[in-house]
Image: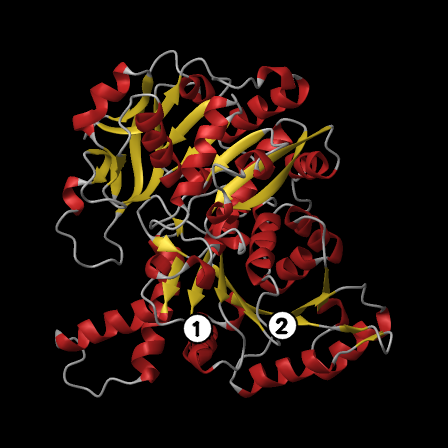
Amino acid sequence: MATKYIIVTGGVTSSLGKGIICASLGKLLEARGLSVTIQKLDPYINVDPGTMNPYEHGEVFVTDDGAETDLDLGHYERFLGVNTSQKNNVTTGRIYYDVINKEREGAYLGKTVQVVPHITDEIKSRVTALGETGEYDIIIVEVGGTVGDIEGLPYIEAMRQLRFDVGKKNTLSIHLTLVPYLKAAGELKTKPTQHSVKTIYEIGLQPDILVCRAEVPLEAGIRKKIAQFCNVDVEDVIASIDAESIYEVPLLMLDEGLDRRVIEKLDLDCTDVPELSKWEAFVKAVKYPKKQLRIGLIGKYVEHHDAYISIAESLIHAGAMNDAKVNISWIQSDEITPENVDKKLDGLHGILVAPGFGSRGIRGKITSVTYARTRRIPFFGICLGMQCAVIEFAREVCGMKKANSTEFDADTPYPVIDVMEDQRERLETGGTMRLGRFDCRLTKGTRSRKAYGKETISERHRHRYELNNTLRDKLAECGLIMAGVNPERDLVEIIEIQDHPWFVGVQFHPELKSKVTEPQPLFVDFVKASLDQVRHPETAKKIL
């Protein structure tokens, strides 16, 4: 069977959920025995989101091969249970960068380089490169942005050409649009959808299926009206109603028949009924938990939850594994001080200090570490969160009162966290950190080793600073456990503290590998330990 391409575009407004629809459709097709991957085409001119402000872009999702990508790739991996790579995220910046380099190298033989055909050809080559591997039956291509945006026009044109190049029988166009409900009028309005479809028609792409986001169900009359004025069959008007959890969306799309229509239109050879028993069990566990607990997420960008979306989803996965609902308290680290920490963190069953860059909010993070350590509340530090735990331990336990990271104090007498040796001469900021998957050997008898159940693991990284090996022995003498070390470079990847219900810091980003069917082991163990605080709150005793 030739590789089939499903093109997903969006109209009317951003944030309609193209990524979730792509991931949900991918899950349904995968559950029918097809091999699926998803690719995101991002119209912004940045080469990648690695240098973008978290408030601007949200989380930077890092793949095994070290690509800094859009957060939608996290949804793809969590839903499909497969890993993505650099090939799964394409930006305008990368496209133009490569085209300009080719022009400088003489690859175009002196011709005038233009948007059509050179930019569009480069876009198409990125899409078809996935298909040419022979690994996938289906490639879902999500075109970022909103139809009609100037920066997105080359992508729509490239997709129009792709349908011609590989044949319409091997392609399908899905358009996600909005059907708003006006409370004052008490009715749904189809005009935004009609105008969106008209716009995409005018630039050359004809939708085969419409997925309509709405707050209330679409009645038969509304579906018929949309079909009539948008030139699709009534059964190709698919309703996407707001759901309590994103993990319900595949089941809702199954009820709407989205996968069935795709299979019919692309003439796909697959099983008649998708195997979703594990997925359904997971959704049931999420919707109907037997227990509840509260985890405090201490971060610098908590106003924008997308900045920590993989952490939030990992807690959901871990909660379901423990038959529990994890309620997250989003706490701004800037606002935590030694004077108000008791009030700010009161009532938490676990504390997670999140990743980040820069000195803002560090005092609050370190204060939160002290609170968790001295009150014996389960603590999980990720990347910068681990570094803050090391700084706190050095100051309060080892007596190194001015211990710090050279990121925050270049002249500290105790640089317990220092810039990595291979990062010292780096001048460029984009794509130059320690990125991607690296191995870690776990120390026998540690909580981390018990949680993973094996000696060697591999996790994804995104950092410039590390625990300083020159002070490692002094920290160990004071009781800091080096629970995980990179075997190739002898870098400390995991730290733990003895005589504590659960205190773990990791230099890597475990949240990036948590999936619905494979919850991340450290998150599962962290939630389990935090549940013990719910059942036995007397174990949280202050250390004087």
Q: Residues within 10 Å of mark 2 (few under 14, many from 20)?
A: many
- Is residue 511 or residue 356 the one in the foreground? 356
Q: Tell whether 31 sits left or right of 43.
A: right
The structure residue drawn at horizontal position 77% and vertical position 78%, both measured from the top left corner, is: 189
Q: Residue furthest front?
A: 339
Question: Residue at the spot x=48%, y=17% of the render?
Answer: 543
Could you tell which of marks 2 and 1 lies nearer the N-terminus?
Answer: 1
Give the residue at x 62% y 80%.
Answer: 196
Is residue 228 shown above or below 402?
Answer: below
Label ID, residue 208: 2
Observer-nearest of 27 and 161: 27
Q: What residue type is labelled 1?
A: Leu
Total marks drawn? 2
- Dot 1 lies on which element? helix
Mark 2: which amino acid?
Asp
**Residue underneath mark 1:** 162
Color scheme of the displayed model:
secondary structure
